[in-house]
Structures are given as structure tokens and as C-alpha cells.
Amino acid sequence: MEAFKLKTLEDLFETPEERVELIDGAIVQRPMARMEHGFVQSNTVAELDTFRRTSGPGGWWIATEISVNYSCHQCPTHDLAGWRKERLPERPRGVVESVPDWVCEIVSPGHERKDTLTLFLLLQRHQVPYYWLIWPEDRSLVAWQLDGGGYRVIASVVAPGVEERKMRIPPFDTHEIDVGYILGD
């Protein structure tokens, strides 16, 4: 019987498969893109564009489908990730080695465990300050903020009505964001 060998970033680069990532030392297939996923992802980018356009303090590098190398056996591809420009003045390139300041995953059916548990614990362990999860089918968003060594919920929104469409959710709380738009209203 052959022992299980944890895969590394080098193994990930050598794989001929498309849409794969390195999670817990295993090369795993990313879910097939769905319209709901793509719609929420593009709406989130559009809604946060004002933060990307800001230079200097308050500005962000926000990217979609970005691979972040946290350790030799952990290189997930995040749906959205952002780095504060004041902390990382130069735009990241390639597979990013710097821990993001914010990660947002759009939960895909059949991959809930990865987003809600595996990545949650990985990001918490690597001290990513903010983690958002969006469920397109449920039209809901939950945002966590690192507090000491663990995450605590700072926002939880389900199918917002007219009165709660615009909200201030850290780390983007300097401006109101249209959560209804992000969730597909």
C-alpha cells in the first residue's frame, strides 16, 4: 500500500487539469461556474469598484479568481480577495504570497464544506482580517471579522428589503454598499 503524499504548489503547477486548487495537500477541482455565481461575483466587483479606484490610504487591490499561497500545502483560488494598498503598495502579481486583508467566497452547491469550514479555518489560522460568504441561491451574505484568534459575525443579511439594501459592512464601511445589488436584486 502506497502512503498518501501531500501535494505542493509545484504539483499544482504541473497538473494538466484546469480549474484546480490546492486544499489541505490535495489538488481539488473547482466547481463548475454557474450563472448565479458569476452574477454575484461581478456585482460584488462592480459595487466595490470605488475602493479599487482609490489610490493611497483607503485604496484596495481587489481581484477575482486569485490563487493565494498560504503554505506549502494550501493554495486555494478565492472567488474574490483584496489587499489594502497602504499595506501592499505594489499590485500583487502571479500566485500571491501575501495574506489578503479580505476574502469573499461565493458558496457553490456541493462545495459548502470547503467554503464554510475548510477555508474558514484556514483563513482564521492565517489571520485574514475579514471573511465574507455569499449564498446566491438564498440571496444571503454573512461577514466575519477576526477578533483575537477567531472570527465573529459582523453582518448577516438575507434577501434585503428596500430599507436595508444599503449597508456599511467592514472592511468597506467608509461607504454604503448596495447589498441588494450584490445579491442580485
Image: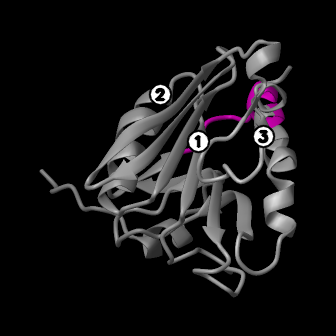
* Pick the front one: 156 or 20: 156
Q: Position of residue 110 (x, y in %)?
A: 51, 23
Q: Residue at x 79, y 33 (%)?
A: 182
- Name the residue that disc number 1 marks: 105
Q: Which residues are magenta?
A: 29-39
Say above or below: 92 vs 7.
below
Who comes first in sequence, dot 3 or dot 2? 2
Nearer the camera: disc 3 or disc 1: 3
Left or right, 83 with respect to 175, comes to left
Residue 106 locus on image (x, y percent): 63, 36
Apparent side of residue 184 relative to residue 136 in the rendered image (left or right): right
Label 3 to label 1, Cα distance in Å? 17 Å
Placement of 82 over or under 96, stated as above or below: above
Q: Label 3 belongs to which residue?
A: 177
Which residue matches tag 2? 112
The answer to whether 94 is drawn above or below residue 17 in the figure is below
* Disc nearer the start of the sequence (3/1): 1
